Image (cartoon, rainbow, N blue to C red):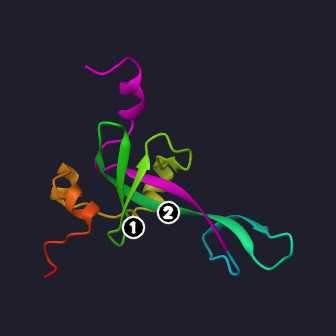
Amino acid sequence: MRPFGLGLRFRRFQPGDPVIFRKRKAGTCPGPRALNVKPAPRGDSYAYVVEKQWRVSAVDERGRLSLVTRRGKLHVKDATDHDLRRPSLWERWRLRHRFPALSRRSRDGTDSAEAASGLNEDSP
């Protein structure tokens, strides 16, 4: 049985859910999807935020989410991370091509350990 309150905090995300992660970046040339662009004090670079569209592949018992990118990378983030949020209905429709599709195996969480260790069945 879970302690009181933990269920409400972690039941928010389930495998297969699309999420948006706000990644902070710095560079000399922000891309077209850059938000909140701010110049550095000396003017050599910029600080900005890019919204990444990922999908939940697994949720562990401590509330950490395994997130899959469009190119297949795996990131592990805490479910309470302030830079992680659910997309609105409008964003889900407008950005639907940016959210990665999950295979049946990764939706079940059976290959999340393989992905975390960097092993791939297709590679020799």
Query: Residue 111 appears at what percent x and percent y?
Result: 18, 58
Residue 10 lies in magenta, yes or no?
yes
Q: Residue at x 38, y 62 (%)?
A: 99
Say which mark, if any, is on residue 69: none
Disc 2 packing (10 Å; few <14; some 14–19; many ≥20): some
Residue 60 lies in magenta, yes or no?
no
Q: Is residue 72 left or right of residue 43?
A: left
Q: To which quarter of the image does residue 69 belong?
A: bottom left
Q: Is residue 49 above or below residue 43?
A: above
Q: Is residue 118 left or right of residue 21?
A: left
Query: In which quadrant is the N terminus drawn?
Result: top left
Q: Residue at x 46, y 46 (%)?
A: 86
Query: What whole-number distance in Å separates the C-alpha atoms at marks 2 and 1?
Result: 12 Å
Q: Callout 1: helix, strand or loop?
A: loop
Q: Is residue 75 above or below residue 46?
A: above
Query: Residue 96 appears at what percent x and percent y?
Result: 40, 62
Pick the residue in front: 75 or 90.
75
The segment highlighted magenta reads 1-26
Query: In which quadrant is the C terminus drawn?
Result: bottom left
* Lower position in the chain sequence, tag 2 or tag 1: 2
Q: To which quarter of the image does residue 49 belong?
A: bottom right
Pick the residue in front: 117 or 97.
117
Residue receiving disc 2: 52
Query: Residue 42 appears at what percent x and percent y?
Result: 86, 75
Say which mark, if any, is on residue 97: 1
